Image (tube, rainbow, N blue to C red):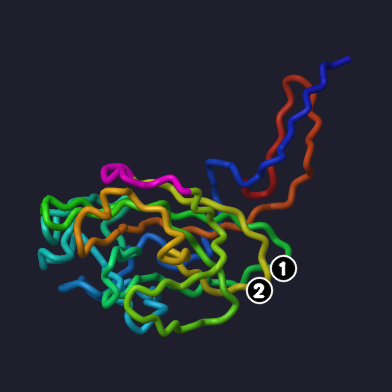
Amino acid sequence: MKHLTILFLNILCLINYINGQVNLVPNGSFEELTHCPDSRSQIELADPWYSPSKTGTPDLFSKCATDYNVSVPKHYSQNFQNPRTGNSYAGIFSYFYKLEIAPVEYLVVRLMDKLKKQKQYYLEFYISPRINNDPFDIPCYMEGLGMVLLQKDTIFNLKGGEHIVLQSAISQDGKIIRDSVNWQRMTGCYSGNSEEYILIGNFKSLNQTVVDPLCYQSIPNAAYYYIDDVGVYEFDPLPDTLYLCKGESTKIGAKF
């Protein structure tokens, strides 16, 4: 009798590699531009991305830009970051310390298809904090950003310093993201319910947001994060347990 090996797949959402899956996020790495950015606050050039708030003005950075404020890899005030992939990425202010006139920013995009009810989806995007050599403007480092899924397009009327407080599908566990060299992956799993829009940003209130204590050493101060490679992928359904004989193998789902 062949030896039986039991393969437990209890945490499907921890799969680290996706092969051949369709990304439901259009222009997920901000590579398709209607025009090269020539100033800040031009996320709309990476169509169909835009700001879900009237006061937010997310930025688009690209290697094709000639303006120093939005060029890649070096740009505004001695900041530096290469794209994780391709030539472009986005950037948002996600937290302000005692600067109530400034708006917290978010990104939104309409998915290529509505999420199916009760279907499981894998969510991911990558972030990196800005660096700044200005001793009077110490960057705030905060916990990772989140992703929210909505059924309808919503425009939020935010006052300076206000946050969109919603339940995020990607957990922000209090680990402060300080690494400004390597891109950090934000991941989560979600059960679909006809959602068609995703929002990316800080969905905790000002008091609930975990930030580096250094953030409080100067006023004003802000957390600014770059964003790249946003993805929403459908999982194939699988049983909780697969039974395999020693030496045998199987394909996990139709696409994974």
Q: Does the magenta stretch include residue 178?
A: yes
Q: Mark 1 points at which residue?
A: 117
Whichever of callouts 2 and 1 sits on the residue coming sooner in the sequence is 1
Q: Does residue 126 appear in the picture of this structure? A: no
Say what amino acid the circle numbered 2 marks: Ser
Which range of residues does the magenta coloring cover? 174-182
Say what amino acid the circle numbered 1 marks: Lys
Given residues 95 and 83, the one toward you in this image is 95
Given residues 95 and 61, the one toward you in this image is 95
Is residue 162 placed above or below 170 in the rendered structure?
Answer: below
Is residue 184 placed above or below 99 in the rendered structure?
Answer: above
Q: Are marks 2 and 1 in contact (CB under 8 Å)?
A: yes
Direction from residue 144 to residue 152 in the image, left or right: right
Q: Mark 2 points at which residue?
A: 194
User: CA separation, marks 2 and 1?
Assistant: 6 Å
Quadrant in which the N terminus is drawn: top right
Residue 74 location, x and y as percent?
14, 54
Residue 151 location, x and y as percent?
60, 77
Is residue 207 placed above or below 142 in the rendered structure?
Answer: below
